[in-house]
Amino acid sequence: MVDFKIILSDPATGRSYKIDATGPAAGALIGKRIGDEIDGGIFGLAGYTIRLTGGSDKTGIPVRRDLPGPARRKLLLSEGIGFHPVMEGERRRKSVRGNEISADLVQINAVVVNTGAKPLAEYFSQPEAAAE
């Protein structure tokens, strides 16, 4: 099955959390598009709504929101995701991936849209180390 690393950002606190999505949680993301809002319950985050904002595949190639489909393509870019020009008017052909989530992606970036009753810090709190 597919495994994803979900990087979930909380704009209220400015912190990010990592979720390892495997099995049914990862399968629920296949076919979704960048910009879609999903229920956080599939990751065990009751009451949360999450918006998918980006990602990258196994070779580090970024996902572009304005490119339909899951395939990797080489586009002539002048700015934006996948290319940042150094000189004025510079364009370059770069590989980018479409906005549909497929099994080739490794990392998916997301942001919290609606919060639940419990803060995210409680879901991701580290167990306290025993005092020696």
Image (tube, grey):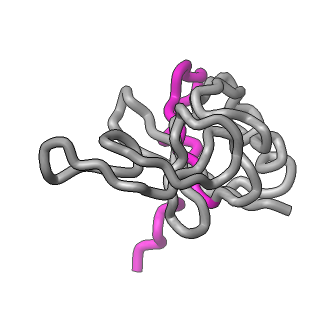
Q: Position of residue 50 (x, y in %)?
A: 60, 29
- Range of magenta residues: 106-132
Q: Is residue 17 left or right of residue 24?
A: left
Where residue 44 appears, as percent x and y from the top left, is 72, 40
* Image quarter of the N terminus: bottom right
- Determine whether 111 is above or below 27 in the image: above
Pick the front one: 18 or 58? 58
Residue at position x 55%, y 69% in the image: 59
Residue 78, quarter of picture: top left
Left or right: residue 51 versus residue 27 is left
Among all residues in the image, which is located at the extreme bottom?
132
Q: Residue furthest left?
A: 88
Going by the image, does 11 lie left or right of 62? left
Quarter occupied by residue 37:
top right
Residue 94 location, x and y as percent? 44, 56
- Can see residue 18? no
